[in-house]
Image: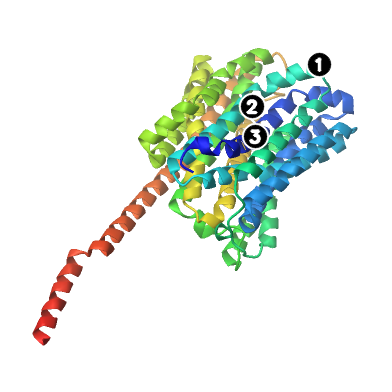
Amino acid sequence: MTRLREAWIALAGLSAVFLFEMLDNSILNVALPTIGRELHASTTALQWVTGAYAVVFGGLMLVFGAIADRFGRRRVMLVGLVLLGLASLATAFVSTAGELIAVRAVMGVAAAMTTPLSIALAFRLFSDDRLRVRAMTLISTVGLVGLAVGPTAGGLVLAVAPWQVLLLVNVPIAALAFAGIRAGIAADDDAELHRDPVDVPGAVLGTAAVVFALVAPTLFVEDGSGSWSPWAATGAAVVAAVLFVRRQRTAVHPLLDLKLVARPLVSAGLAFKAATGLAVAGMGYLVTLQLQLDWGWPPALAAVGMLPQVIVLVFAGPFVNRFVERAGLDRAAWISAVTVVSGLAVYGLLGRFGYVWVAIPLALVAAGIRVVGVVAGVNVLRGLPANRTSIGAALVDTASEVTSGAGIAVTGTILAAMFTGTIAAADWTAAQTGEFRAAVTVAGLTLTVVAAALVGYGIARTREGSAEAEREHVGAVDADRGTPGDLAGDDRRAEAAGQDR
């Protein structure tokens, strides 16, 4: 297709998929107190209402990305949307917290089957990178609007309807997405798929590594760094990740070909995406605690305090397209990633000195991730073969999910180490206030250093990719025209041939 307008049916369906992913947790969080009262759920059970979804979603993305590259992206997407609709309908019959957690886990499976594929299918719609960026910007904007209005919409719905309605809304969204994708996207081309056997041991190890990596941050926050459980989960994640890498290096048909991940465009895009996931989760966690616990803002005012981030995320879409067209994909990626690191640095150095030094970093980080969120995905997919784009899209989302958890784990651990007493207790002493503010500075700067290292690696890989592309271009020109040395050799061969005659 040569224009976005030609693909409006497909884009409507793909936007609905991303809307579900962004709207789901944000709209449900408002209802957690109500759910707890009606289902007599414990605090831990309520945490798993959202946690079960996130862990299953993050853990299965790579597996379903690999399956989609073998059996069809459109086919897996449509099956996932049917599963989403059925799981959402099941909410109407939930009567216990355990049943709700099970439903949320199934919805996590559906999200793992659909969300990464929205990127892969949008990429496949167009052959022009400029249109790919515009399409993904449109899709992400719809999702971010859902993220922004979710809490408010959820509160209004709860005033007039039972909490189940908040999840039943996924049914019409899934139906819209199904109709748009089925009508607007052609069936999968066998030439863009592959039939390698599924690497089952690799799938198990990869899923285990991601699941433990996502569970560990929650345990750090809940149990503290002095407990054995978060460290055990972290150790299990590391062991599973090492075994997964070893398996992928030795398997005849690996789940994830590490040689493809090492390609400059792919590794750079993943590094930029990882840096933004770390920044958004870590800084968001710190700012939320700072506004409410340190400065004493009520929750409603704290929500208003996050508006600089929300405004930039929702309304920056048109500027993203213009910026990327002027800067180019590679420059846009590293400039926006550097912007994220700059926002983190400003917050770490100055965030304790007043709200303006919180608002500026929120806006900077939001501006950076608004571009990286689109460009990193496009760069990763254009750096991969056509029959590996689904797992590439899954890698992008998995990198963001895992580093988001790491960001919370890092900040939570630093706060636990530097703050004495219970952080949620009222009426801090002057000493505790000083400890908290020092911890915010240390955590903010730690996140800055880690994110800067990831961005620096991404920039280095981008430059390697540019140099490699230039060499390939020169080689292609030489092959077409003949190098000076080749031409001289041709002349000598011609002269020899004339002497022979």
Secondary-structure class at tag 2: helix
The answer to whether 79 is drawn above or below residue 417 in the figure is: below
Question: Mark 2 highlights which residue?
Answer: 146
What's the residue at 67%, 29% (across, down)? Answer: 23
Task: Identify the residue at horizontal 46%, vertical 35% (top origin).
Answer: 337
Q: Residue at x 49, y 18 (%)?
A: 357
**Mark 2–mark 1 CB contact (< 8 Å):** no
Amino acid at dot 2: Gly
- For the residue pair 113 and 242, the one nearer the viewer reads as 113
Indicate whether 163 appears above or below 80: above
Q: Residue furthest left?
A: 499
Q: Position of residue 498 (x, y in %)?
A: 10, 82
> How many other residues sit within 10 Å of disc 3, few (<14), some (14-19) or many (≥20)?
many
Distance (Cα) linking label 3 and label 2: 10 Å
- Residue 365 locus on image (x, y percent): 50, 28
Q: Position of residue 435 (x, y in %)?
A: 60, 22
Closer to viewer: mark 1 or mark 3: 3
- Residue 159 sits in which quadrant? top right
Is label 3 in a helix, a strand or a loop?
Answer: helix
Please identify the quadrant where the C terminus is shown: bottom left
Q: Which of the two discs, 3 and 2, labels the residue nearer the N terminus? A: 3
Helix, strand or loop at mark 1: helix
**Residue located farthest toward the bottom when viewing the structure as drawn:** 500
Label 3, on which residue? 16
**182 horizontally vs 278: left or right:** right
Name the residue at 48% across, 20% down. Answer: 360
Residue type, numbered disc 3: Ala
Query: Is residue 264 left or right of 73 when viewed as pictured?
Result: left
Sequence-wise, which precedes: disc 1 or disc 3? 3
The image's mark for residue 160 is 1
Marks 1 and 3 sit apart, C-alpha to C-alpha, by: 25 Å
